[in-house]
Image (cartoon, grey):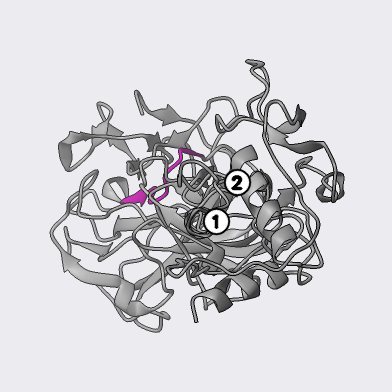
Amino acid sequence: MKGIIKTLIITTLLVVGGSVFAATTGDNIIISELEYDAIAPDQAGEWFELYNPTSKEIYLTGWSFTDGEGTVTFPNQKKIYIKSNSYFIATHTATNGSLTNYPSVSVDLEYGNLDVGSLSFANSGDEFSISNAGGNLVDAVSWGGGARFNISADEGETIARNNSIDTDVEDDWLGDQVSSPGSGSLTLINQAPLDISINGGDSYSVDENTPSGTIISTITTTDLDSSDTHTYMLVAGVGDKDNLNFTVNGTDLELAFIPDYETPVDLGDTAANNTYSIRLETNDGTDTYEKVFIISIVDIVESESSSSKKGGSRIKYTCKDESSTNYNKFGRHRQSLCEYATSQVVIAIPEITMVTPPNEVTCTINYTRLIKQGSVGEDVRQVQICMNSLGHTTGETDGIYGPNTYAGITKYQTSAGLKYIDGVVGPETSTALNALSN
């Protein structure tokens, strides 16, 4: 604060009584040091110090302080505030803008230049408190014989806080301290995180068939301590049922599975309804905050399995058009129905006949989901290897289900006399394929 305030407003007496003590919240202004037995002139040399342990500046306009007998209110005509991690000095009588006995220490408020009545610190024992503009007690201290706190200081010494956390006990204070107005070892109190978000909200939607490992969201924290850094993790607790389907990498939330709208595996809020429930934690190094999020799976239009029938001459499968606008925000192409004629995809579907497979068959399918048009992954590659070993060519074994894979699977389903000839590797087809290797 530049300059000092030389004005006084006497207000209605704030009755505090003999049991004045500090509020325990520890999230506001604290009385940090007080010299009640000053070197002569005694009353003129009295002073107290306030400290702001929070991460924001706090305005004192309308606040008041009292010794239980007289009360002074901070004036309204000037904005009075304490910056974060800063001290505020008030004295009965300043000398050239400084503390009377400490000429190098500037004063922020001089409250004794007018008649202050009975507001004076008693050397034998007294109390002192400060309240906010709403009249709520913010902090307080007492000293000497009969006071709540049995602390004291000799002439020219002070009583002072030993840390920034206000626990409302005598051990918060030290007596007989060497005066250090405007300085000290007090530090900011950590403010716990207030909120956590994924892409700025409490829920998010993901397209089905999005590859495992895809970053689906950025995690952020709301925290009054703007300089804090935060770490994130999935934690146990209410709403954690689907945690295993996701991973956290730094500030990124990633998929740990390939979501399939038609065969959901969620266990969260309501099982198998394509909404996955996870519980995230943010940690600022001192305090934590946890929250439950819902991830919804979006149904993407896929091929109609009924469009390929015995004896048919055309098939449908999920393909890409080349429109530059047909990509979602993760850079993944949105797939749409395309129709291919037999001139484009050669497929022969003979009458159902049982065939004997070759002597060497590689058909070990790790079946965990429906493998169908648009599927991508190691299980697709296993099916492709199997089809090729059976003579039902699928082309490259690249783990991408395309028209050639569809052709190979439907040829096998037909030749094996299976009930479903739809190009989908489900329970029936996967069981039949795995049996070939046994």
Q: Foreground: 11 or 391?
A: 391
Q: How crowded is mark 1: few (under 14 residues within 10 Å), some or many (20 or more)?
A: many
Q: What element carries label 2?
A: helix
Q: Quadrant of the N terminus?
A: top left
Question: Residue 321: where, in percent of width, then height?
Answer: 68, 22
The structure residue drawn at horizontal position 30% and vertical position 78%, both measured from the top left corner, is 171
Would you say 289 lies left or right of 103 here? right
Examine the rendered structure and indicate whether residue 393 appears above or below residue 76.
below
Residue 57 belongs to magenta span: yes
**Residue 108: x %, y % from top left:** 36, 34
- Specify whether 304 is left or right of 170: right
Q: Which amino acid does label 1 sit on?
A: Met
| Frontmost residue, 113 versus 360 | 360
Residue 402 in view in this figure: no
The answer, for residue 47, to whether it is visible in the render is yes
Q: Residues within 10 Å of mark 2 (few under 14, many from 20)?
A: many
Secondary structure, mark 1, is helix
Rendered position, 71 above or below 396? below
Q: Which residue is drawn at 36% across and 62% down?
A: 286
Residue numbers of the magenta segment: 47-58
In front: label 1 or label 2: 1
Q: Name the residue under label 2.
A: 405
The disc at residue 387 is 1
| Left or right side of 100 for 73 | right
- At 53% from the left edge and 59% from the top edge, which residue is drawn? 390
Q: Which amino acid does label 2 sit on?
A: Thr
Q: Do the residues labelled 1 and 2 touch (CB within 8 Å)?
A: yes
- Decide which of tag 1 and tag 2 comes sooner along the chain: 1
